[in-house]
Image (cartoon, grey):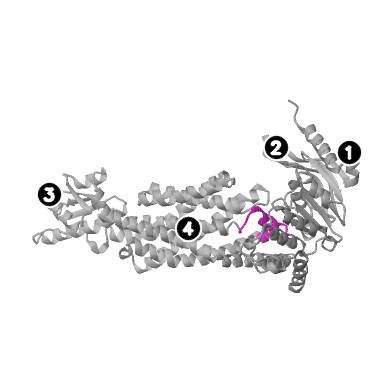
Amino acid sequence: MIEVAGLVRVLGKKKEQKRVIDDLSFTAPADAITGLLGPNGAGKTTTMRILATLLRPSEGTARVGGYSVVDEPLAVRRCIGLVTEEPGLHDRLTPRELLLFAASACGLSSDKAEERLRHLSALVGLDAHLDTRCGRLSKGNRQKVSLVRALIHDPPVLLLDEPTANMDVLATDAFHELLLDPELRAGKTVLLSSHSIDEVDRLADRVVGIAAGRLALEGTRAEIAARDDAGDFRRAVVTILGQTVLAREPVL
Amino acid sequence: MKAERTRGATKFFTRELLIARRDWRAGLVAGLLPLVAIAVIGVVGIFEGGQFSKQADVRVTVAVPSADLGRRIVAAGDGLVKAKVLADPALAVLTGQADISVAESAAGGFVVGTSAQSGKTAYALPLVTAAVDAMRTAKPPGVDATNVASTEDGPASSAEDLAKGLLIVLVLTSSGFAVTAAGLLAIESDGGELEAALVLPVDRRTMLLGMLGGQMVVQLLQSLLYLLIVGVSVVVIAGYSQHLSLVQRVTLPLVVVYGEILLLVGLGAAGLLLGGLARGRGRAGAPGASAVSASVTLLAGLSVVFTGWERTTALLVLPVVGAGAMVERAALGEPVVGSLVLATLGCAALFAVATQVVQRALRDGASRSRAV
């Protein structure tokens, strides 16, 4: 479970300080995919970085898996898996080397690591590429490696920061299928950051919409769709996010 | 906790070595770059010292007290020397009218002097002193010739020139190293790679120490390779080996290599800190290390240009590489300015130290071979 309360993150120097996250609060429950939806620059990545302990919040609290990102960052890192827009692989290592290293750094024994590697690579269809250098893999396969790395230690929380942003249509579809696989996500808290309404519509059980660093909407897809006269999820999201952005624009 | 940290650091340390092992081709290419650059310098040096000088009249000017001596020196000068008869040859060197002076001493002998620093002069000086030496031996008995320069001890400016030569090699190899460093010290990183590493449940300081430790070992191993390739090549290609003692031949390349290690480990650490941790975004590595790499190369180019040694080559090779690196960084939209300034300052300090070390190592030889 992820609990965010009154989160603020200020970036920039004194004279040009900007609250990229401004009093953000939301909850992402366990055993569900929560979509963190928002336009570019809304603060999604900053939020994900705070939850992944890569950034410290300026104010507010965030708890991941029950641990505070500020006070217990190591405990948080033990219980998360992070997939970013750039898969972030060592091109000269093979997926097997990379994943076994990640497992080792997460404290898995070599037997357990091998077992997890076999299981997950079979699940995502990566086993044929385990000994090919990462630099030679396709974008889709690179992101699969990134996903397996995030899952290798079986974390209860999975943070996905625009994982399909650089992928083509087919690779994106395959990645979506993986995320929908009940075995892969069983019992996990999944927070999926995306600027694609379609992606969130397809994958998320719950949606948290942010714009200009602020919470704009939160609820299940059905609840959000109900806020549009015609019950259209897409139109409801666009309308609410748009209104939030406009409300934050300076008046000339 | 301590044991856990050690294990964590060891894992990252080992991984860096594994990656570096995979990178051996790139490392080799980077390692060969300075060799190529030195070869270019060697070729240009040959042209400048030989045919090129004949065609373009860039000969060394020797101020002499008499036309007779001037003719002898020109004849001995292998086409590299032209003579100018002046009343006060020593003053001519000081005022820049000549590169080398030959003056008659009060005792009736000859004094060969120079304050010039170019490799060209260093090449010509033995020829001039040989001609003077021949003149001395032709003199009638009774003339005090103790002040005449002897070629056995080497020319007066050879040590300084050698120091400059080595400094340039230091610069060159550092730029080559910097190319390697851009790949290695970046921890093979785009932002995502380091992000992925930073979310591993390992203490970050331990992790970075492990990585840097791995990098240091990699650099050390590469340095040994460079010691073989560059250190030996420098001495041989530059043609200075006859002026070095055996001890100097061994120790000076080591000084060069250690200078590089200092530079790169220091700059690599600076790059990591400046490029990433200071920015607080967990994107340590690539931008900082690249900026450092670029700044080292650029600074190297500027250093060589301003020290004046083999300007042509320096102008052609190093700034082009440096500017190329800078353009590449800028094209990638990476923030280089802040890192560049700090890295340049650090780099300048390290260069100063390295220069002092090299020059100190040469001082004994300089005093032995000083002829004036």
Check the image and report above or below for A7 versus A135: above
What residue do we see at 74% from left, 46% from top? A46
Q: Is residue B337 rendered to the left or right of residue B46? A: right
Pointer 2 chain: A
Place residue A58 in its image quadrant: top right
Kindly identify which residue carries mark 3.
Answer: B67
Ranked by sequence position, the earlier of labels 3 and 4 is 3
Calculate the distance from the C-alpha at mark 2 to the C-alpha at mark 1. 36 Å
Residue A147 visible? yes
The verdict on residue A132 being magenta is: no
The amino acid sitting under disc 4 is: Gly
- SS at circle 3: helix
Pointer 3 chain: B
Counting from the top left corner in percent of width and height, residue B71 is at 14, 53
Pointer 4 chain: B
- SS at circle 1: loop
Kindly identify which residue carries mark 1.
Answer: A228
